[in-house]
Amino acid sequence: MDKTQLQSELQYKAVRSSGAGGQNVNKVSSKVVLSFDLKNTQGLDEHEKELALVQLHSRLTTEGILNLNCDEDRSQLRNKELVTKRFFELIKNALVVPKERKPTKVPKAVIRKRIKNKKSLSEVKKNRRKPDF
């Protein structure tokens, strides 16, 4: 993953935001929309692209473009920093390969203990019965 290459491929667009800001919100475009073309990026190798496409498939458009929004702050610059940080965290998490699960067996001691408990409980219940004559 080449961070500088990815950084250069990011496209930002500022739009009007809803929320806090009073009348200022009607004049200032403080919301930032980040767009990133995941299918045609040069910052990731082919294996990383495949991993990211699988992990982020629900967040991509049909053309393979990832869109992220940020309107948490009243400042456009701060929103741009936040959305960029969020983008890199998302990409980093998408490229993590999960460890393969090793199936485990039930230990023999656990099986013996369970059977011993069953036998003792069976013995207790047998002793509660009326004697046979």
Image (cartoon, rainbow, N blue to C red):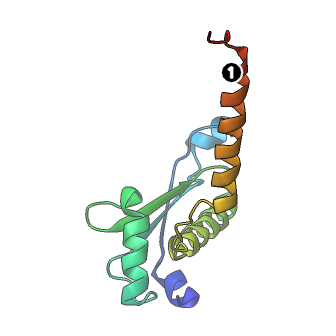
Residue under pointer 1: 125
> Considering depth in this image, is 105 or 24 the residue closer to the camera?
105
Q: Is residue 50 positioned above or below 65 on the image?
A: below
Q: Residue furthest front?
A: 133
Question: What's the amino acid at mark 1?
Answer: Lys
Q: Quadrant of residue 84?
A: bottom right
Q: Position of residue 47 (x, y in %)?
A: 39, 86
Q: Is residue 60 left or right of residue 133?
A: left
Q: Is residue 4 positioned above or below 30 on the image?
A: below
Q: Is residue 4 left or right of residue 55?
A: right
Q: Is residue 66 positioned above or below 10 on the image?
A: above
> Considering depth in this image, is 39 or 15 the residue closer to the camera?
39
Q: Residue at point 67% right, 9% down? A: 130
Q: Residues within 10 Å of mark 1 (few under 14, many from 20)?
A: few
Q: Residue furthest left?
A: 62
Q: Residue at point 71% right, 49% down? A: 113
Q: Position of residue 125 (x, y in %)?
A: 68, 21
Q: Residue at point 50% right, 89% down? A: 5
